[in-house]
Image (spheres, rainbow, N blue to C red):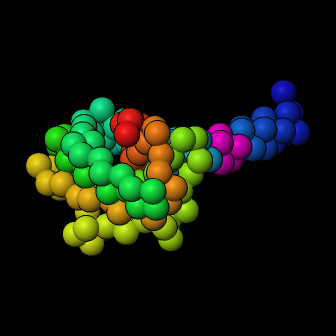
Amino acid sequence: MGFSSVAGTVVMVVALLIAGLYLYDTLDKNYSLLYTVYNKYQKHLEDKLNERLVITNVVSTTSQTNITIYNNGSVVVEPYNFTVIFDGTIVPPENISYNPPIPYLYPLENITLIVNWTQPNRICIVSNNGNKYFATV
């Protein structure tokens, strides 16, 4: 075994070590990102399971509907991110006002959504966590 065989082996071992370190660094960064995203997903699922909104009252006229929602769960929700659907049609956010105008609906509190839209037969409220709540007029 001559000098060229030893030198070739050393070059190959060093190249494998450098490639291994690069591969480890790349996998570690991607695993950290994946772990962070998975934790956010788990938190979202937990919030979705612990959210319980109840539509307690619906008062409707030909051009305005008042929907009272009670937060009976253990999760704080954001009423401004709710989607209101009347008979399968999404109501534009500019036609919805809130009484009281609070950014967060804490557990055991209620809020009234004042919707200036045509009189519905069926109402669907989709919360910011993706749960759907139905009411009929």
**Range drawn in magenta:** 18-25
Q: Is residue 73 above or below residue 84?
A: above
The structure residue drawn at horizontal position 46% and vertical position 38%, both measured from the top left corner, is 122
Is 24 in the magenta? yes
Residue 82 point in image, percent of width and height: 41, 54
Q: Viewer-proximal residue, 44 or 16? A: 44
Residue 21 point in image, percent of width and height: 61, 45
Using the rendered image of the protein, determine whether residue 73 is visible from the camera's viewpoint. Answer: yes
Is 1 in the magenta? no
Q: Is residue 65 left or right of residue 34?
A: left
Which image quadrant is residue 99 in?
A: bottom left
Q: Viewer-proximal residue, 27 or 115? A: 115
Q: Viewer-proximal residue, 102 or 3? A: 102
Q: Is residue 35 left or right of residue 18?
A: left
Extreme-front residue of the structure: 62
Residue 132 point in image, percent of width and height: 41, 37
